[in-house]
Image (cartoon, helix red, strand yellow):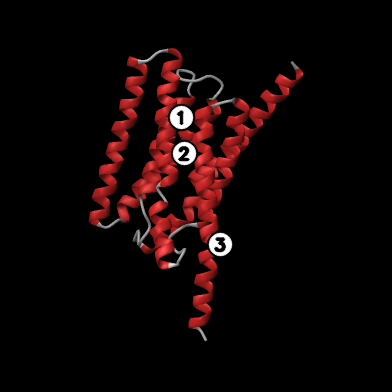
């Protein structure tokens, strides 16, 4: 009983840590990028896809964490509900300053994601019950989480091609790795396979981004030094 109590306390504590790091990831780390977008009144070469995918991921994860779907995951709902609100704000800012072609693309993806969320919520309530409902929502949330964490891959390709990290924000990559590490530990203790998979994939991709940032930041700095000689 003592071991079970200690495990429950550790599980809850890691959930709190996961909440804090996730809120920094969703709310604060993109602020540096969007401050630049607002001050220049241009989205430049930044991609809006990660923020739209973050919103859908947060919505589905928040739904998964509700007592209607899974037990003892309320912390998942609180952090992802807040994350969805942050992501919505960032998407709206991006749409305001994006060029027309990019605005149309991101707007279409935005409304598609809203439709997906509504469909998942309705199907889960009307078509599934008990553990099958949890599995359906867990699979949906996990797939979208992997897509969200994989959405910066286009930026990673750009970094490798241009050998520049200008448009791959460091703090976003850093807090992806930190937040996913916290949630992975939380999921392992709580024995939640769906969160384990999504957080594990996110952790790997976050580490890859940090490695690329370290490598190509050095290359960019060396090029700048050489150009000043």
* Residue 93: image location, x then y, percent: 36, 50
Residue that label 2 marks: 83
How crowded pointer 3 is (Cα within 10 Å; few <14, some 14-19, many 20+) is rated as few
Residue at image location 30% in from the left, 26% down from the top: 119
The residue that appears at 49% across and 45% down in the rendered structure is 27
Image quarter in which the N terminus is found: top right
Q: Nearer the viewer, residue 184 or 25?
A: 184
Mark 2: secondary structure:
helix
Secondary structure of residue under mark 1: helix
Closer to the eye: label 1 or 3 = 3
Circle 3 or circle 2, nearest the eye: 3
Q: Residues within 10 Å of mark 2 (few under 14, many from 20)?
A: many
Q: Total label count?
A: 3
Where is mark 3, residue-wise? 214
Q: Which mark is residue 62?
A: 1
Q: Residue at x 74, y 21 (%)?
A: 3
Disc on the earlier residue, 2 or 1: 1
- The quarter of the displayed image where residue 33 is located: bottom left
Residue 166 visible somewhere in the drawing: yes
| Residue 16 position (above or below residue 4) | below
């Amino acid at each position: 009983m003592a071991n079970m109590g200690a495990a429950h306390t550790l599980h809850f504590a890691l959930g709190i840590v996961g909440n804090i790091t996730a809120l920094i990831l969703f709310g604060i780390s993109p602020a540096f990028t969007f401050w630049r977008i607002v001050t220049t009144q241009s989205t430049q070469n930044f991609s809006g896809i990660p923020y739209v995918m973050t919103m859908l991921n947060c919505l589905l994860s928040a739904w998964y964490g509700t007592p209607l779907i899974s037990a003892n995951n309320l912390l998942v709902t609180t952090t992802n509900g807040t994350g969805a609100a942050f992501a919505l704000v960032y998407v709206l800012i991006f749409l305001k300053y994006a060029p027309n072609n990019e605005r149309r693309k991101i707007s279409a993806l935005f409304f598609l994601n809203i439709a997906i969320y509504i469909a998942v919520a309705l199907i889960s309530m009307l078509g599934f019950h008990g553990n099958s409902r949890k599995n359906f929502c867990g699979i949906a949330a996990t797939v979208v989480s992997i897509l969200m964490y994989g959405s910066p891959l286009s930026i990673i390709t750009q970094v490798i091609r241009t050998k520049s990290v200008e448009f791959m924000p460091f703090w976003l990559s850093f807090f992806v790795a930190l937040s996913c590490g916290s949630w992975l530990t939380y999921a392992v203790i709580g024995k939640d396979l769906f969160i384990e998979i999504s957080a594990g994939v996110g952790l790997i991709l976050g580490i890859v981004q940090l490695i690329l940032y370290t490598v190509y930041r050095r290359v960019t700095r060396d090029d700048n030094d050489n150009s000043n000689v």
